[in-house]
Image (tube, rainbow, N blue to C red):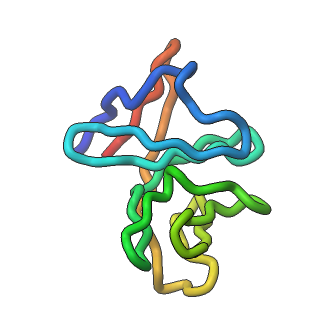
């Protein structure tokens, strides 16, 4: 069973309707803040490997900065293809720490 590890402090989280990259061990995680709901998913776009954490939030979707693929930050599902999906990870906040279960 996996366990929660520290991802960041609450102060480091992205501002509302922005995304940001975080490194945990050998993984880079995309954290998105959509209308105050913070989610975490793999940082690599399935299209050409673009850095999702450098993307933008548009109409509740995370948009890859390289070629515009859009993902639902809560499910990791690509908007254009139900079969295309990046992994999403549970988050929890304890005191001022943001923890992630990988």
Residue at screen point 47% across, 85% down: 83
Observer-nearest of 83 and 49: 49
The extreme front residue here reads: 66
Q: Is residue 89 left or right of residue 14?
A: left
Q: Is residue 26 left or right of residue 17?
A: left
Residue 97 placed where, x, y %? 46, 19
Q: Determine which quarter of the picture holds residue 56.
A: bottom right
Q: Is residue 37 left or right of residue 9?
A: right
Residue 94 placed where, x, y %? 48, 19
Residue at screen point 59% across, 58% down: 73
Residue 65 placed where, x, y %? 56, 63
Residue at screen point 61% across, 41% down: 38
Q: How many marks?
A: 0
Quadrant location, the N terminus: top left
Residue at screen point 62% across, 64% down: 63
Against 29, is 58 above or below? below
Against 31, is 80 above or below? below
Q: Is residue 27 left or right of residue 68?
A: left
Residue 47 placed where, x, y %? 43, 79
């Amino acid at each position: 069973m996996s366990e929660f590890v520290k991802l960041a402090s609450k102060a480091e989280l992205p501002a509302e309707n922005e995304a940001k990259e975080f490194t945990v061990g050998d993984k880079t995680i995309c954290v998105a803040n959509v209308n105050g709901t913070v989610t975490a998913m793999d940082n690599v776009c399935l299209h050409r490997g673009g850095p999702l954490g450098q993307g933008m939030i548009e109409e509740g979707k995370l948009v890859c900065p390289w070629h515009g693929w859009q993902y639902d930050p809560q499910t990791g599902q690509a908007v254009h293809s139900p079969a295309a999906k990046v992994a999403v990870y549970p988050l929890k906040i304890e005191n001022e720490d943001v923890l992630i279960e990988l």
